[in-house]
Amino acid sequence: MNARKKFATALAAFALTAGLVTVTAPATAAPAGPAAECGVRSDGKLYCGNRGGAKGYAHRSYGSDVRGRMNSTFSWFACWGRGDSHGGGNNVWYWTKLDNGQWGNMPAVDLRTAVDPAPGLREC
C-alpha cells in the first residue's frame, strides 16, 4: 500500500472515530435534560417526571372514576391536595391535565418528586 492510500485510510478512520464520538456524546448528556428536572417554574406549575401510564382520577381517591392516563413521562401539575394514602407513604395528590385532555388527580407516588407536597406549588 502506498503512502497516499495509507494516509487516506488513516484519515477515514480518524473521521469515522470523531464522528462516532460526536454522535454518542449528546446521548450521554441526555439525563441532565428536562426529564431530570422537578420543580415549580415561574408560571406557578410543577414540571416533573412521572410514571408513564399513570392513572388520573376524578377525586383524590383510587375508588373514584379514572379520567384517563398520563402516558408522557414529563408533565406539569397545577396544584396539590390531600386524599387517600398511597404507596408513596403519604396522601398527597397532584391535579393535572391528562394526555387525553381531561383533568385528573394523580397520586404523588406516580411523580418523581423529592418531597411531597412539592415546595412552591399551591394547594388546591
Image (cartoon, rainbow, N blue to C red):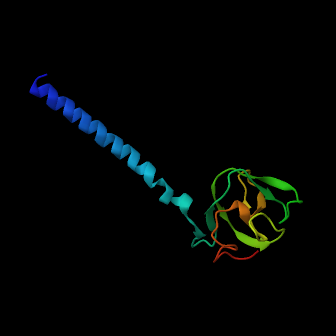
Asked if residue 72 lies left or right of residue 103, the reply is: left
As drawn, which residue projects farthest toward the top?
A: 1
Q: Nearer the viewer, residue 18 or 58?
A: 18
Asked if residue 84 lies left or right of residue 1, the reply is: right
| Residue at x 40% of width, y 45% of height | 24
Q: Is residue 78 above or below residue 27?
A: below
Q: Tell me which corner region of the image, top left, top right, bottom left or bottom right, holds residue 61.
A: bottom right
Return the x and y of residue 63 as percentages of the image width and height.
Answer: 89, 60
| Residue at x 15% of width, y 31% of height | 7
Q: Tell me which corner region of the image, top left, top right, bottom left or bottom right, holds residue 88.
A: bottom right
Q: Tell me which corner region of the image, top left, top right, bottom left or bottom right, holds residue 49.
A: bottom right
Q: Nearer the viewer, residue 115 or 93?
A: 115
| Residue at x 77% of width, y 71% of height | 90
Q: Quadrant of the C terminus?
A: bottom right
| Residue at x 82% of width, y 59% of height | 57
Return the x and y of residue 73 as percentages of the image width and height.
Answer: 63, 54
As drawn, which residue projects farthest toward the left?
A: 3
Q: Nearer the viewer, residue 100 or 16?
A: 16
Asked if residue 26 lies left or right of residue 46, the reply is: left
Q: Quadrant of the N terminus?
A: top left
Return the x and y of residue 46 as percentages of the image width and height.
Answer: 63, 68
Q: How many marks?
A: 0
Q: Is residue 4 above or below residue 54?
A: above
Return the x and y of residue 18 as percentages of the image width and height.
Answer: 29, 42
Q: Nearer the viewer, residue 13 or 107?
A: 13
